[in-house]
Amino acid sequence: MKLKQALAGVAALAAVSAAHAQSAHTLYVTTGWFHFAPQDSSDPLTIDSVGGRPVNSPIPGTGASVGNADTAGVSLGYFITDNIAAEAELGIPPKFDLSGSGSLSPLGKIGEARMWAPAVLLKYYFNKADSKFRPYLGVGATYVWFTGDSITNQTLTQNIGLIGTRPLAPLGLAGPGVQTSVSTTNSWAPVFSAGFNYNFTKHWFAGFSLSYIPVNVTANLDTTNTAGVHVRSEAKIHLNPIVTYLKVGYAF
C-alpha cells in the first residue's frame, strides 16, 4: 500500500511539474546555435560615377555571392497568452565571406563583413500550455546592418579598372597604388518563422526553428588612384538567408 501511495505521489508531482510549462505570463530565455544559409543572387556590378560624373553603367557578367555562416545566439520571450508569445532574438554577428561570381569567379573570395540582424517576432503556439510538444508559426521584423566591411582580394583592388567592357585603366585605376574600400547599406526586412519546443520539465525545454528573411543588400565600392581620381561602383545582392536555430531554454 505504501509503495502504491509513493508511486501515486511521484506521478502527481510529475504532472504538477509539467503543468503550465509555457502558459500566459511565462518569461523564458534560450541559447543555441544559428546557421545562416543565404539563397543569394546579385545584380551586375555597376559603375555609378567617375570623378563625380554620373555613369550608371552595369558590367554584364559580373556579380557576387555570399557564403554560409554560423554563430551562437540568445533569445528572450514572454507568453502574452497561453498560445501567443513575443520574442527577441540576437546572435553574435557572424562573419560572411563575399566571393566573385560570373566573370569575377576566378577571383574567389573578394571581401568579408559581419552581419547584425536582431529580430523581434510574434509567435503562435499550437497545443495546450502543458503539452510537451508545441509547434509554432511566427512573423516579425529585423534590421540588418554590417560592420567590418573590407575588400581582402588585392587582385580585385588593383585591377578593378580593367573589369568589364569599358576599362578604366587609362584613368590610372589599375595597378599598384589603387585603393578600394567597401560599405554596405542597412535595411529593414520581414522574418517568417516556423518551429517547435519540446518541454522536458516545467522549466527546461529544447527547440528548433527555421526562418526566412527576404532582404537585399547593396555593396558600395569606392576606388581611388594615387592622383585622386575617384570611381564609385555598386553591387546589389539579394541575400535572402534561411536561418536555423537549435536551442535549449529555461522558462521562469
Image: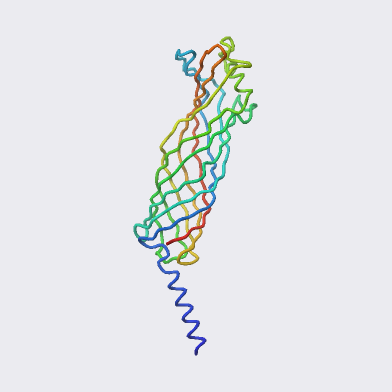
Residue at image position (63%, 16%) is 175
Q: Position of residue 196 (x, y in %)?
A: 47, 57
Q: In the depicted view, which residue is nearer to us: 100 or 155?
A: 155
Count of number-bearing discs: 0
Which of these two is toward me, 197 or 71?
A: 71
Which quadrant of the view contains residue 70?
top right
Residue 85 in picture, x, y percent from top left: 38, 55
Between residues 90 and 69, which one lies in front from this camera angle? 90
**Viewer can see residue 172:** yes
**Residue at figure coordinates x 45%, y 30% from the top left:** 185
Instruction: Give percent across and percent down for residue 31.
Output: 51, 53
Q: Within the image, what quadrant is residue 119 found in?
A: top left
Say above or below: 161 vs 211: above
Quadrant location of the C terminus in the rendered image: bottom left
Which colour assignment does the render follow?
rainbow
Residue at point 47%, 85% (across, down):
5
Residue 167 in view in this figure: no
124, above or below 231, in the image: below
In percent of width and height, residue 80 lies at 34, 57
